Image (tube, rainbow, N blue to C red):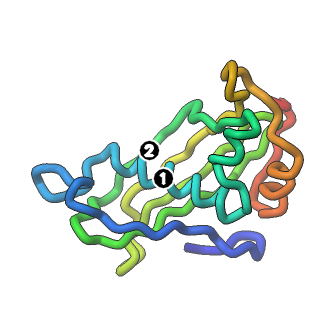
Amino acid sequence: MRAQNGVQPFAHRCRVYYEDTDAGGIVYYVNYLKFMERARTERLRDLGFAQSLLVGEGLLFVVHSSEARYHAPARLDDELLVSAEVIELNRASLRFRQQVRRATDDALLCEGQFLVACVCADNLKPRAIPPTLRAAFADLGGAGTSKAGE
């Protein structure tokens, strides 16, 4: 995984378990989305923001849209590196670019983009990303900002 703008890339390590595979012994396609969800959660935690605490503050992050492209299969016991890079930071949303790579050979297995909206926990209406969280993502250096002010 390459660093951009001098910022150390983030990667969550995980292992493929039997429950992640299909009858053919390869990772079932939808499980890549689960791996990427976990990496986004761990990215937040790495920045000092636990989702359990954000929920307590009335804030949720929900996936608005996703796209994924599959390149090669992961198999039982593979160790995976799952990146979570913010490429767009708006008033009430973040766009992540993510990759799933096999740790042993750095092979790209799956990649995708996810638009994640910030919403109020009680009514699921869009809300602004809190300034401290926004600043943490902005400090990463890779996130562009949108003029649309979503």
| Residue found 72% across the figure and 62% down from its top | 47
Q: Is residue 105 above or below residue 34?
A: below
Q: Would you call the spot at circle 2 few (<14 residues within 10 Å), some (14-19), or many (20 or more)?
A: some
Q: Which numbered disc, 1 or 2, marks the residue closer to the eye?
A: 1
Q: CA distance from mark 1 to mark 2?
A: 10 Å
Q: Would you call the spot at circle 1 few (<14 residues within 10 Å), some (14-19), or many (20 or more)?
A: many
Q: Is residue 94 above or below residue 98?
A: above
> How far across and how far down the image is residue 66, in percent?
51, 37
The answer to whether marks 1 and 2 mark residues whose Cβ atoms lie closer than 8 Å is yes
> How far across and how far down the image is residue 128, in percent?
82, 34
> How far across and how far down the image is residue 20, in percent?
26, 54
N-term mark: 1 or 2:
1
| Residue found 11% across the figure and 50% down from its top | 23
Residue 36 tag number: 1
| Residue found 86% across the figure and 35% down from its top | 147
Identify residue type, mark 2.
Answer: Ala
Quarter the N terminus occupies: bottom right
Of 121 and 32, the residue lying toward us? 121
Q: Quadrant of residue 16?
A: bottom left
Q: Quadrant of residue 113?
A: top right
According to the picture, the residue beneath numbered tag 2 turns out to be 68
Identify residue type, mark 1.
Answer: Met
| Residue found 15% across the figure and 58% down from its top | 25
The secondary element bearing badge 1 is classed as helix
The secondary element bearing badge 2 is classed as strand
Query: Horizontally, is 70 left or right of 60 in the view?
Result: left
Query: Horizontally, is 15 left or right of 65 in the view?
Result: left
> How far across and how far down the image is residue 122, in percent?
69, 23
Residue 86 tag number: none
Quarter the C terminus occupies: top right
Q: Quadrant of residue 72?
A: bottom left
- The tally of labels here is 2
